[in-house]
Amino acid sequence: MTELSFIHRYEPATETGRPPLLLLHGTGGDENDLLGLGRMISPGAALLSPRGKILENGMPRFFRRLAEGVFDEEDVKLRAGELADFVAQARQAYGLEAPVAVGFSNGANIAAAMMMLRPEALTGAALLRAMVPLSEAPQADLAGKRVLMISGAMDPIIPAENSAQLAASLSAFGAEVQHQVLPTGHGLSQTDLQLLVRWFGGR
Ligand code: MLT
């Protein structure tokens, strides 16, 4: 595997015309977690899947937190920058166009932060169980970026108004946001999969 700034897995595209996917796992996951999901939701797309560098009791994450749902915001900014730099390196190493992020939980939160802080890194994002990553949303021009947010109405970690606020910020910055709230919790469901397949199918 090419030496880049994150441990990662990379699968080249087997079909043309589909944007690469940047797969971002949840807390305690790793670079292998979302490869299967990526293959299902955008068959033939290139897959780029890094492992978060922060360890919380041995569990990889993409940034530090002080408690569940309480983030170390300076670290969020630093790590979002590092991840955007990795994306740029990987695009050069593998000859890729800008990817669409597919992030779950902690991976969705770093994707949302990266989109606001380094909008050039992503062409869009599918954010699964995302919450507001920075209490003061940085101003960003997100015109032309597509975002799918899927939240759980019974998610014990993310209050409904928090995910609604993230969707509102992203659309205020110009992104084309589709926000779906499912009657489910923090875990992914079959309906998530169906919505993802449909959203990617339109590309
Ligand atoms: C986070 O830390 O990003 C959120 O609390 C979600 C999680 O990873 O549990």
Image (spheres, rainbow, N blue to C red):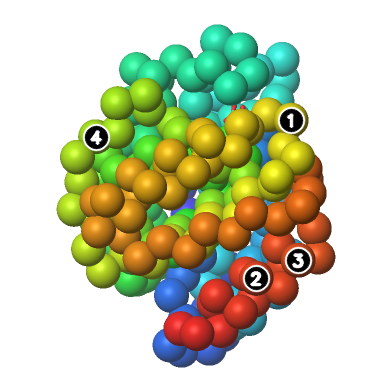
Secondary element under disc 1, as helix, strand or loop, is: loop
* Residue that badge 4 annotates: 138
Asked if marks 3 and 2 touch (Cβ < 8 Å), the reply is yes
Earlier in the chain: of badge 1 and badge 3, it is 1
Query: Is mark 4 in CB contact (under 8 Å) with mark 3?
Result: no
Q: Quadrant of the N terminus?
A: bottom right
Question: For mark 3, what is the residue?
Answer: 191
Helix, strand or loop for disc 2: helix
- Pointer 1 residue: 156
47 to 89, vertically: above or below: below
For residue 141, the mark is: none
State which tag comes first along the sequence, 4 or 3: 4
Give above or below for 92 relative to 59.
below
Helix or strand or loop: what does disc 4 sit on?
Answer: loop
Quick one: label 4, few (<14), some, or many (20+) residues within 10 Å?
few
Which mark sits nearer the N-terminus, 1 or 2? 1
Q: In this rendered view, identify the residue nearer to me: 119 or 191.
A: 191
Task: Work out whether residue 186 can be spotted.
Answer: no
The residues bearing labels 1 and 3 have C-alpha atoms spaced at a distance of 19 Å
Indicate which label's residue lies in the foreground, 1 or 4.
Answer: 1
> Looking at the image, which residue sits at the far bottom?
16
Mark 3 crowd level (few <14, some 14–19, many ≥20, 10 Å Cα) = few
Q: Amino acid at mark 4?
A: Pro
Residue 170 picture location, percent across and down: 34, 50
Q: CA distance from mark 2 to mark 4?
A: 28 Å
